[in-house]
Amino acid sequence: MKKLLAILLILFLFLTSCSDKGKDNEQKEQGDQLTTEITEQEGVDSDEEPAKDDSGEKAFTAAEGMIFDGRKGKVSLQQELERDGIRITFDYVLFDDEKGLFDPPPEGHIFMYPVLTLKNERDDDLGISFASQSSCVATVDGEEYRRSLDALYSYSGREMPTLDTDVAKGQSEQVHTGMIIPEDWKEISFFVNQMFDTEHAPVEMIFELKRDSGTAKEVQVPEAKFKEVFAAAPRLSPENYLNIDEIEEITGLHNVGEINPFVEDRMSQVNYILHADPEGSPDSLKRVELRFNIFYAKDELTRENRYASGSQDIFDRGRKADSFVEDIPNLGDDAYWCTSDYGGYPQLCVLVNDDTYGPFMIALAINENSDKQILIPLAERTVSNLKKLNEN
C-alpha cells in the first residue's frame, strides 16, 4: 500500500512540473510577440538585424513593398542619370500615413520619402555635397514641396542616412529625404541637384510620377530627363524691341536726348528724354524721362553660367516686393505695376514667354511729367515686336 501511494505521488509531481513548463513557454512566446509588435509599431531598437525585402534593400517603413492605395506603398523608379561625373539613381518613393516616431501627417496628406543613390565619378578629387532642403525639390500638381522635418522626424532615418551628405570621389551612398504632400496627387516632379558647386553647374535632373486621377492605384513613371536649357538669347539693345519712332508715335512726344544704351549679360537698358517741343531742351523741367529695360531669359548663357540673374527670378521678386501696386488686367497675369528704384517712378513689368529663349521681362518706367498709362501701349508694342523678332 505504501509503495502504491509513493508511485501516485511521483506521478502527480511529474504532471505538475510539465504543466508549469507549458505555461512558462506560452508566457515567453506571448512576451516575444508583444516585443515584436512594439518594435514594429513604435520603432523601438531591437537586437535583431533589420528585415530586408525581396530587393535586398533595408526595410524603411511599414509601407515598403505594399500595393500603392493612395496613402501607403512603394513606387519603384530605378532611373539613372549622369552629368559632369555626378551619377544619381532614383531608386524608389515610399508613401506612408503612419505617425512613426513623431506625428502623423495632417488630414488629407501623407508622408513621401524619395530614396536616391548618389555616386561620385568625377575626374578630380573633389567631393560632392547635397542637402535635403534643396537637392531634391518636389512639384506636386503645380505646388512646390521641400523637405519636411516632421516627415524626417517621424521615421528618423534609422536605417538610411538623409540627403544631407558629402560623397567622396569613387564613393556612393543611398540616402532619403522626406516631405508631406496631398494624398490625392496626380503628378509629382522631382528636381534633383547637388549643392552650390564652384566647379560644375547644377546637374538639373528631373524624375517624375504620374497617375490618371487622385485615387488611381496605377502609377506611371515617365522617362527621366534633364531640365531644358534654352538657346542663347540675342544680346540686343531695347531699341531693337521698341525703337524711337514707335515711342514718338505712341506718346506724341519727341526724343530730345538719349543716354547711351547699356548692355550686360543679363539685361539691356536705355533712357530716353522726351519733350512735346521737338526743339525742347533735355534740361527742361517739363521733360519726360522714359527708361526701358529688357531682361534676358534665365538660361541665356547656357547652364554653365549659373551666376546670371534670370528674368523669371526678377519678375517674381518684383511681384512679391513691398513696392508692388496692382496687376494690369488688359496685359494678363504676367504684368504688374510697381514703384521702380529709378527715382521712385511708376514702372510696368511684363513677362513674355518664348519657346526658343525662355522668359523675357520688360520693364518700362516714366517720371511724374507724364501719365503712367502711356506705358501700357508701349509695353504692348514691345511684346509684339519681341515675338516677331524671335520668330525670325
Image (cartoon, rainbow, N blue to C red):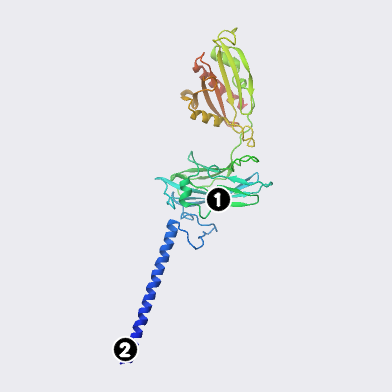
- Decide which of tag 1 and tag 2 comes sooner along the chain: 2
Determine the residue positioned at 55% across, 28% down.
352
Q: Is residue 213 visible?
A: no
Q: Amino acid at mark 2?
A: Leu
Residue 175 in picture, x, y percent from top left: 55, 50
Q: In the current view of this chain or complex, which residue is farthest to the right?
A: 123
Depicted 380 relative to depicted 40: above or below: above
Viewer-closest of 186 and 155: 155
Q: Is residue 42 above or below residue 331?
A: below
Q: Nearer the viewer, residue 116 or 101?
A: 101
The residue that disc 1 covers is 175
Residue 153, percent from left and from top: 47, 49
Q: Which quadrant of the structure image shows residue 308?
A: top right
Q: 25 above or below 332?
A: below
Local packing at callout 2 (Cα closer than 10 Å; few below 14, some 14-19, many 20+) is few
Q: Is residue 232 left or right of residue 251?
A: right
The N terminus appears in which quarter of the rendering? bottom left
**Residue count near mark 1 (Cα–Cα under 10 Å), binned few <14, some 14–19, many ≥20:** many
Residue 290 location, quadrant: top right
Give the residue drawn at x 33%, y 91%.
Answer: 3
Dot in front, 1 or 2 = 2
Q: Is 124 placed above or below 388 here?
A: below
How far from the left and from the top, in percent, is residue 392? 63, 26
Residue under the point 37% across and 73% down: 23
Q: CA distance from mark 1 to mark 2?
A: 73 Å
Which residue is under mark 2? 5
| Displayed quadrant of residue 41 | bottom left
Element assignment for label 1: strand
Question: Where is residue 384 shown, x and y percent of the image?
Answer: 56, 23
